[in-house]
Image (spheres, rainbow, N blue to C red):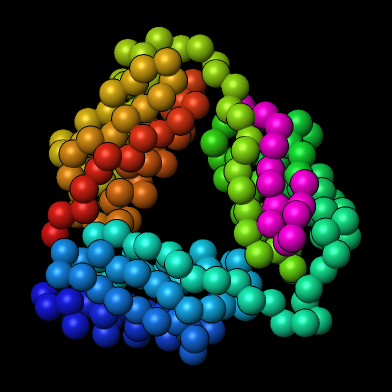
């Protein structure tokens, strides 16, 4: 498929998603299927959704999200006020442990503290990103190691991959070293890649995932 065709489909996907105002978004696609997004959007949530939209398009192999967040004047918030809203939202979410903290500088939220699971860290990032006035989120939450054996983590990941209908686990390998899971191999789409990464994060004891997977159509 020609890069011009992929570019047109990415543009269509951005336009199709009602969560994204794509009027000021420029799309460039290289021959290898790598996509670069440039321009401006009105919120950090839109920036994230734009990358997800591009990843949904067939033949896209990677996405370089260079979009800038430019808030409307009435959406700009004082850092102290913004931090208060972020902390309140984190506290009200039952999935996020009380050990997670947040600071704000120039609209960028930095999450710190500890959590036991990646889904808790992901939930904290998702909640912070949705607060009006946030222009960026930096995740500095440390995952506690639950301490299982590497063989146990590898077996659990392999079983999860075999159960997942979206994933051909035969083409993916997972190596584990001190809680760090390294995924290698090829997948057929970004959805399959996301499924493999999610399976790795769901294993007890995973503290980091190195994604060396290649999307191959």
Vertical order, 117 against 19 (above or below): above
Report the front residue among 63 and 200. 63
**Residue 113 lies in magenta, yes or no?**
yes
Report the front residue among 211 and 154. 211
Which SS does the magenta portion mostly show?
strand
The picture places residue 179, in percent across and down from the top left corner, at 44, 20
Relative horizontal placement of residue 146, taking residue 203 as reference (left or right): right
> Residue 175 appears in which quarter of the rendering?
top left
The picture places residue 101, in percent across and down from the top left corner, at 77, 39
**Residue 145 lies in magenta, yes or no?**
no
Relative horizontal placement of residue 60, taking residue 136 as reference (left or right): left
Total labels drawn: 0
The picture places residue 208, in percent across and down from the top left corner, at 46, 30
Going 45% across and 34% down the picture, which residue do you hit? 201
Going 15% across and 54% down the picture, which residue do you hit? 216
Q: Which residues are magenta?
A: 103-116
Vertical order, 194 against 185 (above or below): below
Going 76% across and 44% down the picture, which residue do you hit? 102
Which residue in the rendered view is the most extreme toward the bottom?
23
> Residue 141 appears in which quarter of the rendering?
top right
> Residue 13 appears in which quarter of the rendering?
bottom left
The picture places residue 113, in percent across and down from the top left corner, at 71, 32
Relative horizontal placement of residue 164, taking residue 96 as reference (left or right): left
Q: Quadrant of the N terminus?
A: bottom left
Going 55% across and 18% down the picture, which residue do you hit? 145
Regarding residue 18, the answer to whether it shows in the image is: no
Report the front residue among 159 and 151. 151
Q: Quadrant of the C terminus?
A: bottom left
Vertical order, 194 against 71 (above or below): above
Which residue in the rendered view is the most extreme toward the left?
1
Regarding residue 151, the answer to whether it shows in the image is: yes
């Amino acid at each position: 498929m020609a890069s011009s065709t992929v570019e047109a489909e990415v543009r269509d996907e951005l336009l199709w998603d009602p969560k994204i105002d794509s009027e000021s978004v420029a799309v460039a696609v290289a021959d290898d299927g790598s996509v670069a997004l440039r321009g401006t959007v009105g919120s950090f949530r839109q920036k994230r959704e734009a990358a997800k939209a591009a990843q949904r398009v067939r033949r896209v192999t990677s996405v370089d999200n260079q979009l800038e967040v430019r808030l409307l004047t009435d959406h700009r918030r004082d850092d102290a006020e913004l931090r208060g809203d972020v902390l309140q939202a984190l506290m009200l979410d039952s999935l996020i442990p009380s050990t997670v903290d947040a600071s704000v500088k120039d609209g960028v939220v930095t999450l710190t503290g500890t959590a036991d699971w990646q889904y808790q860290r992901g939930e904290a990032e998702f909640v912070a990103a949705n607060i009006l006035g946030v222009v960026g989120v930096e995740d500095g939450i440390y995952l506690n190691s639950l301490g299982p054996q590497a063989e146990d983590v590898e077996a659990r990941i392999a079983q999860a991959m075999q159960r997942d209908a979206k994933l051909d686990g035969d083409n993916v390998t997972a190596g584990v070293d001190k809680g760090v899971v390294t995924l290698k191999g090829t997948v057929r789409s970004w959805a399959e890649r996301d499924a493999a990464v999610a399976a790795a994060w769901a294993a007890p004891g995973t503290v980091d995932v190195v994604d060396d997977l290649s999307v191959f159509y």
